[in-house]
Image: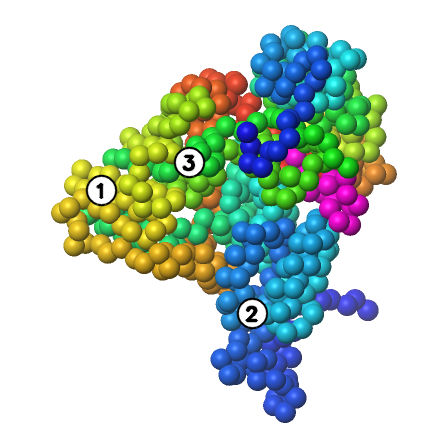
């Protein structure tokens, strides 16, 4: 038990503790993300575990959370390390659908993955009215093509 | 008419101002550096970000230096802001220390040269990087990063911007650790073949972290604790007062685990004594991954040197033990200041009293301040710190996966191990990014 933990940790009524959720297979974790009865907690833990074990099959479930205010960052956490081009497709597809912080986060993830196909949409976003979005787009472009 | 100007630094103004003010009657002696005081033009002006209990001890080491002026504190907790302001104001006999809840305001202070960062670990690398980008030098408490990617970004940023960085791995300036270093580097141990680093003792700093969340509690008003800012780049989770009261260690989102907790010091000493500050081991073989201690991670450098990270089996010389073994002898020391060696080396080295060993932080702070002025690299500079942290992160990744890993320090990758490679970075919460 971590230092100072006095109360029992949270758990999901169906999926259980963090340890139990993170022991699930990748297909079960992806299914959990689509389960409307799963708690925010369970979905957050599933995203974190998919960062390590998720594959192409998990991408649609993770990408479906990019527009979720509370889970978008967790979805990015799951997606960013998956070494499959479908992740880049999903992140690019999310760009026109999002605004504000959620859009900024997706741009940051695209930058992390250095997706060269994103150069054109990112180049448009550097003129976005939201300065945080514009800054993120510039930073992502700099990561994708350090020379520009 | 075109008006041209060149940037004018604080020291330019102070220097010229002091020279112009030749009339001694209106200039206090301290301003001119008389009576043993340091003139303002030679003082390092300091700000603080997130100073808690450990940070306050480091701050005292800064305040003990004649050439430091602490100007401002930024913290997400009002009681912490007040506490640090109180310390500074008491020291200077005024009420000048400014308080901020937003680090942007502190970074905007052009009169601040350097910043002491002592937040929780999740903030260390991003704040250090952003502080450097704001044109300031950084002294940052350890652990300095949460991931391999953060470690590399830290080193790259400080190298590119030419800012001075000192990690809070003060044992590099500890007298007893330096004596052990001299013994090993002076050849008295013969050819060094094995290094031993004490990593978090399992009973105090368990190697593993948990993904658990504590139960939700009502979030306090933002001016009391800004929970969103406290979380910073870490994933959102519901508020619980235990976290903000310092009980955040052991949670994966906030803490790099027990290997990093002490390894940031002791692996650092090993890298230093081996002259391998620019690299990291190429193999990591974890043992004893269950909940039972002892545990070890046996590592090997490209030159064949062994590094053993372990939580037990040292000689009981205090915390943060490290040991160097060569074919002609060995040396071991820790925070007590006692130095043990092979019998034939007894005459070569002397232990130091605990109080002298405890001066490490003050010496480390002095090293930083001297480098702020000279623009040289301090002992625990960003590259050295980054490589130490990369070694500790790699060890913890091997520990979590429960298998031996190979690592390429030139690319910061685990060749042929996709899972391990995925664990080298974590997505940051908006607006933070590397």
Left or right position of A37 against B55:
right
Q: Are marks 3 and 2 on the same chain?
A: yes
Q: Secondary structure at mark 2?
A: loop
Q: Mark 3 or 2 closer to N-term?
A: 2
Give the x, y percent position of residue B254: 60, 35
Q: Quadrant of residue B211?
A: top right
Eye-nearest disc, 3 or 1: 3
Of all chains, the one bearing label 2 is B
The dominant secondary structure in magenta is loop
The answer to the question of whether label 3 and label 1 lie on touching residues, with beta carbons closer than 8 A, is no
B232 drawn magenta: yes
Q: Mark 2 or 1 closer to N-term?
A: 2
Q: Secondary structure at mark 1?
A: strand
Estimate the spatial distance between the alpha carbons at disc 3 and disc 2, rounded to whole Å.
40 Å
Of all chains, the one bearing label 1 is B
Give the x, y percent position of residue A75: 70, 22
Give the x, y percent position of residue B274: 32, 42
Front residue (pair B226, B216): B216
Q: Residues within 10 Å of mark 1 (few under 14, many from 20)?
A: many
Q: Are marks 2 and 1 on the same chain?
A: yes
| Viewport quadrant of the N terminus of chain B | bottom right
Q: Residues within 10 Å of mark 3 (few under 14, many from 20)?
A: many
Q: Secondary structure at mark 3?
A: loop
Of all chains, the one bearing label 3 is B
Q: Residue visible at 53% across and 34% down?
A: B256
Q: Mark 3 or 1 closer to N-term?
A: 3
Q: Which residues are magenta?
A: B219-234
Q: Which mark is residue B330?
A: 1
The answer to the question of whether label 3 and label 2 lie on touching residues, with beta carbons closer than 8 A, is no
* Image: B39 above or below B279: below
Residue identified by numbered label 3: B201
């Amino acid at each position: 038990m971590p230092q100072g933990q006095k109360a029992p940790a949270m758990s999901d009524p169906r999926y259980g503790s963090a340890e139990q959720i993170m022991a699930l297979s990748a297909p079960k974790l992806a299914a959990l993300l689509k389960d409307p009865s799963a708690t925010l907690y369970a979905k957050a833990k599933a995203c974190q575990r998919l960062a390590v074990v998720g594959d192409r099959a998990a991408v649609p479930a993770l990408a479906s959370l990019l527009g979720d205010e509370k889970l978008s960052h967790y979805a990015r956490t799951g997606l960013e390390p998956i070494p499959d081009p479908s992740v880049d497709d999903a992140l690019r597809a999310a760009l026109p659908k999002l605004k504000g912080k959620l859009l900024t986060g997706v741009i940051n993830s695209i930058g992390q993955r250095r997706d060269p196909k994103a150069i054109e949409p990112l180049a448009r976003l550097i003129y976005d009215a939201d300065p945080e979005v514009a800054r993120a787009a510039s930073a992502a472009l700099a990561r994708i093509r350090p020379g520009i | 008419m075109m008006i041209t100007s060149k940037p004018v630094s604080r020291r330019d103004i102070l220097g010229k101002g002091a020279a112009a003010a030749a009339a001694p009657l209106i200039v206090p002696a301290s301003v001119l550096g008389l009576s043993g005081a340091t003139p303002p033009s030679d003082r390092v002006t300091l700000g603080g970000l997130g100073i808690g209990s450990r940070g306050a001890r480091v701050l005292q080491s800064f305040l003990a230096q004649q050439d430091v002026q602490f100007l401002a504190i930024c913290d997400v907790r009002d009681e912490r802001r007040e506490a640090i302001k109180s310390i500074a104001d008491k020291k200077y006999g005024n009420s000048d220390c400014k308080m901020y809840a937003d680090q942007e305001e502190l970074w905007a202070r052009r009169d601040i040269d350097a910043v002491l960062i002592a937040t929780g670990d999740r903030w260390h690398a991003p704040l250090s990087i952003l502080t450097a980008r704001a044109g300031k030098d950084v002294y940052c408490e350890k652990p300095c990063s949460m991931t391999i990617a953060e470690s590399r970004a830290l080193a790259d940023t400080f190298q590119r911007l030419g800012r001075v960085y000192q990690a809070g791995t003060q044992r590099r300036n500890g007298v007893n650790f330096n004596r052990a270093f001299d013994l090993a580097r002076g050849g008295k141990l013969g050819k060094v073949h094995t290094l031993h680093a004490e990593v978090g003792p399992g009973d105090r700093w368990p190697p593993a972290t948990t993904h658990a969340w504590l139960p939700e509690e009502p979030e306090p008003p933002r001016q009391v604790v800004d929970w969103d800012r406290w979380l910073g780049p870490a994933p959102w989770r519901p508020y619980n007062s235990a976290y903000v009261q310092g009980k955040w260690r052991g949670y994966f989102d906030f803490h790099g685990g027990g290997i990093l907790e002490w390894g940031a010091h002791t692996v650092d000493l090993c890298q230093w004594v081996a002259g391998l500050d620019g690299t990291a081991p190429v193999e990591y073989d974890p043992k004893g991954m269950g909940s039972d201690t002892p545990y070890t991670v046996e590592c090997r450098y490209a030159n064949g040197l062994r590094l053993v990270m372990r939580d037990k089996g040292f000689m009981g010389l205090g915390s943060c033990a490290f040991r160097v073994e060569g074919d002609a002898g060995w040396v071991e020391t820790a925070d007590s200041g006692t130095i043990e060696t092979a019998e034939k080396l007894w005459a070569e080295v002397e232990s130091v009293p605990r109080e002298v060993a405890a001066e490490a932080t003050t010496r480390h702070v002095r090293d930083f301040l001297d480098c702020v002025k000279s623009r040289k690299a301090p002992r625990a500079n960003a590259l050295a710190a980054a490589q130490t942290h990369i070694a500790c992160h790699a060890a913890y990744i091997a520990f979590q996966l429960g298998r031996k890993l190979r690592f390429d320090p030139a690319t910061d990758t685990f060749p042929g191990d996709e899972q391990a490679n995925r664990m080298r970075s974590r997505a940051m919460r908006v607006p933070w990014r590397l």
